[in-house]
Image (cartoon, rainbow, N blue to C red):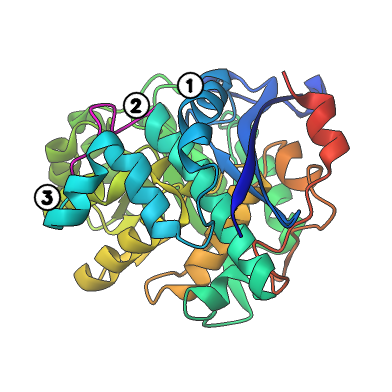
Amino acid sequence: MKITKVEAFNLRVPIPKSQQHVSDFGVASAFQTALVKITLENGLSGWGEGRMSAGSIGNHQSICQYIENEIAPVITGMDSRNITLIWDTLYNGTRQHHALKYGHVFPVMSRRGITVSAISAIDIALWDLFGKSTGLPVHQLLGGKRADSFPAYGSGGWTDASHIGEEMSRYRDVGQFKTLKMRVGVQDGSAEISAARVAAARKALGPDIEICCDAHGTFTVSQAKTFCHLVRDLGVGWFEEPVAADDVRGMAEVRASTHIAISAGESASTRFEFRDLIEARAVDIVQPDPAICGGITETRKIAALCEAANLRFAPHLWTGAPAFSAGLHLLSASSAGFTVEFSLGANPLIHDLIEESFTVVNGKIDIPDRPGLGITVREDYVRKYSV
């Protein structure tokens, strides 16, 4: 079970113009991510994913270089089953022996960003390998899934007030979703225009579909409060990333001012950032991205924090297939997991990268039971779109 080869791939898959959308991030003209393939001495291989940002854009070459130049020499020859040891070794760097001796972390100075995204990719691939080597799905290694399928929410919603009703109705019908999420915030120009778009969506969808809103952290505290006041009677299920992720006190202030649940965490990394977010009483729903926060090993610790704080756990899954599948396994095995994000923007790295398919039926998505992550990566596809 020794690691013999670590390969990283910087993927950029163009999105046809007819399927592109525009948000505060700009035009989504491509979906980009970093994939990693770890191969063992027995020929078995596992796949992981690390991301620069929570959106679909961003050149991931720096993550790939970090994996191949910094991580690969360290973990080559290690036993792939020692997942925690590998995580700690990469997080603590040359001071890992101190961490092992004294029982607390001695993290490298670059303990966020590219470093943790790269660790995320490695970690997901190691869990994939662990499952494949035992013939078990990852959720079984985490304690087992709590149900065969879980509710999924359709994630999209970018058009203006005159078109948002049609867009959201179309999304509802794709998988008979009971919950849909739409974007609000700076792309609209004001909290009032965002609220008008939510009202238009509610009018088109009727009272039985839950509407959630995501501002991508673009409102100020006062704007977020205004928005919450304007949509207070529109049945908003949660308000995601109302203010900048760095403004934890501001997010807590927004949460204290409204009955609408506040969700956040897609750009946060490691259990330490999530501990601070939870202790500040800034969130009701915690949304770590396995490809950003530290992989499966770290996300399960974040899920445990949610369980202890009686908060809901809903991983951010605007990702490629490896991280998406990792999120499914994690959510199904956590007592706090309750819903799955399903991208309704063009996402070829979920639908075209692998041989299997993720499908929502009657508002629910099945949890994979195949060994490891339960996915088969199309390596010809990886080679075709590697930059």
Q: Nearer the viewer, residue 241 or 86?
A: 86
**Circle nearer the N terminus (1, 2):** 1
Highlighted range, magenta: 106-113
Label 3, label 2: how far apart the Cα atoms are: 20 Å
Residue 56 percent coordinates (x, y): 59, 30
Q: Position of residue 95 (x, y in %)?
A: 22, 39
Q: Which residue is mark 2?
A: 218
Spatial CA distance of label 1 from label 2 is 8 Å
Dot placed on the residue nearer the N-terminal end, 3 or 1: 1
Question: Could one spot residue 282 in this view of the protein?
Answer: no
Residue that label 1 marks:
24
Give coordinates of residue 335: x percent, y percent. 39, 77
Q: Say which residue appears at 46% left-offset and 70% top-offset.
A: 338
Disc nearest the viewer among 3 and 2: 3
The residue located at (28%, 33%) in the rendering is 111
Residue depicted at 65% across the width and 65% down the height? 372
Q: Position of residue 271 (x, y in %)?
A: 27, 51
Q: Secondary structure at mark 2?
A: loop
Give the residue at mark 3: 280
Q: Mark 3 vs mark 2: which is more N-terminal?
A: 2
- Is residue 264 or residue 154 the one in the foreground? 264
Q: Label 1 sits on what residue type?
A: Asp
Query: What's the residue type where badge 3 is placed?
Result: Ala
Pointer 1 with pointer 2, Cβ within 8 A: yes
Q: Residue at the location (82% across, 29% down)? A: 383
Label 3's element?
A: loop
Neighbour class for label 2 at 10 Å: few (<14), some, many (≥20)?
A: some
